[in-house]
Image (spheres, rainbow, N blue to C red):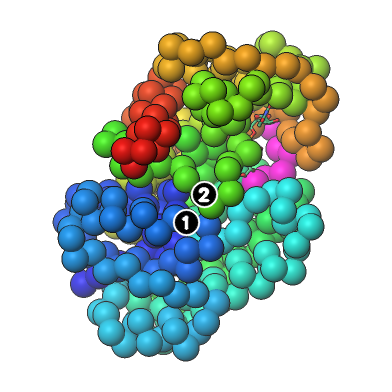
Amino acid sequence: MTTLVVGGAGYVGSHTVVALHAAGRDVVVLDDFSNARSDVVGELRTLTAPNLAVIEGDATDRAAVRRLCDEHDFDSIVHFAACKSVPESFSEPLRYYRNNLLSTLNLAEVAIERGIDRLVFSSSAVVYGMPEQLPVTEETPPAPQSPYGTTKLICERILADASACSALRAVILRYFNPVGAHASGRIGEQPIEAGQNLVPVVMRVALGSADRLQVFGDDYGTRDGTAVRDFVHVMDLAEGHLVALEADLGTQSSCVFNLGTGIGTTVLELIEAAEAATGRRIRYEVVGRRPGDIAESWADCSRAADEMGWRARRGLPQMLADHWHFVNRCADGSA
Ligand code: WQD
């Protein structure tokens, strides 16, 4: 039996492919390579098997998804494929709705048609918007503040409703802030467009390929005035998908889990940790807040621990050391 990993050449997807293979699962990757470099394929085959099946294709094409299911005996699907930039989703909302919703609809429909009974869905803490209470639990009312966050919430509802009337079981994973890379340094966060999230920018400053970091606001009501986030190692997230494939949902047809560390780190604390991990000074200047940013967000992950036995095992120093190892390997061309 085989797991179809849709978006398996992307950041969290590629690390999940490695984790599933390491656990002895057979994997087929489907990716349209709209936000993943083709050289990831070679690295994935080095980390898994030379004959790892990687299919270039579009999950919004239902006929293509059906053809793939004719060729392989899938028992499960992990669905990562989505446009995922908050700012971009405001300028291109219809592309986000079409791509993110249609791919999810197709995969749910074909899974039910073919008797595939487990679908693990890559969701995000963005569905919470500006949570009032902290830490954020899965009961925190969703209130997405962007078209991207809204697509994730609608996809969750599609999967919950589809699984409620079928044999499909959906496990929805809401990630907080993924960072880090596989210890080998062969795969990491390497989107087509240079990432504008905090850690990729910090790493470019450490490398010297960016002059300084702009810190978006230091006037939040936090311990040092800068925003707080729950950074989680991408390999911990990958392992979370493995346990989600095997999780016993009991009588539930779907379930939502937060995947984070439960630890909040401020932007200035992250800069300090990055200087320790890289041995480089991270120059920064404080500027105005970025529109749409929230002050604080960190997860209550007790449900994942209690019901799936999953906990994040890697701390911030390892996240940043692994991220730095990867960007250095890319920078000196060894990647
Ligand atoms: C973190 C903090 C910024 C850059 C993102 C998005 C979405 C999600 C991952 C998929 C904030 C500050 C950042 C910079 C800064 N992905 N910052 N200078 O916004 O928490 O959430 O998480 O779902 O991409 O929702 O992540 O890394 O962009 O920002 O000061 O150059 O770092 O203001 O406080 P965010 P982030």
Does the magenta-highlighted stretch encompass residue 130? yes
Quadrant where the C terminus sits is: top left
- Looking at the picture, which amino acid does disc 1 mark? Ala
Residue identifier under label 1: 36
Quadrant where the N terminus sits is: bottom left
Point out residue 223 in the picture as x, y percentages from the top left corner.
68, 11
Point out residue 133 in the picture as x, y percentages from the top left corner.
69, 32
Identify the residue at horizontal 28%, vertical 84% (top origin): 71
Left or right: 208 as drawn, with respect to 251: right
Residue identifier under label 2: 191
Q: Is 233 rendered above or below residue 57?
A: above
What secondary structure predominates along the stretch shown in magenta?
A: loop
Q: Is 296 rendered above or below residue 333?
A: above
Left or right: 170 as drawn, with respect to 74: right
Say if residue 5 shows up in the picture: yes
Q: Is 280 rendered above or below residue 155?
A: above
Identify the residue at horizontal 31%, vertical 38% (top origin): 334
Q: Secondary structure at mark 1?
A: loop
Say if residue 303 shows up in the picture: no
- Looking at the picture, which amino acid does disc 2 mark? Pro
> Which residue is more in the foreground, 157 or 50?
50
Q: Secondary structure at mark 2?
A: loop
The magenta span reads: 126-134
Q: Earlier in the sequence, mark 2 or mark 1?
A: 1
Point out residue 245 in the picture as x, y percentages from the top left corner.
33, 58
Does the magenta-highlighted stretch encompass residue 271? no
Q: Quadrant of ligand 1?
A: top right
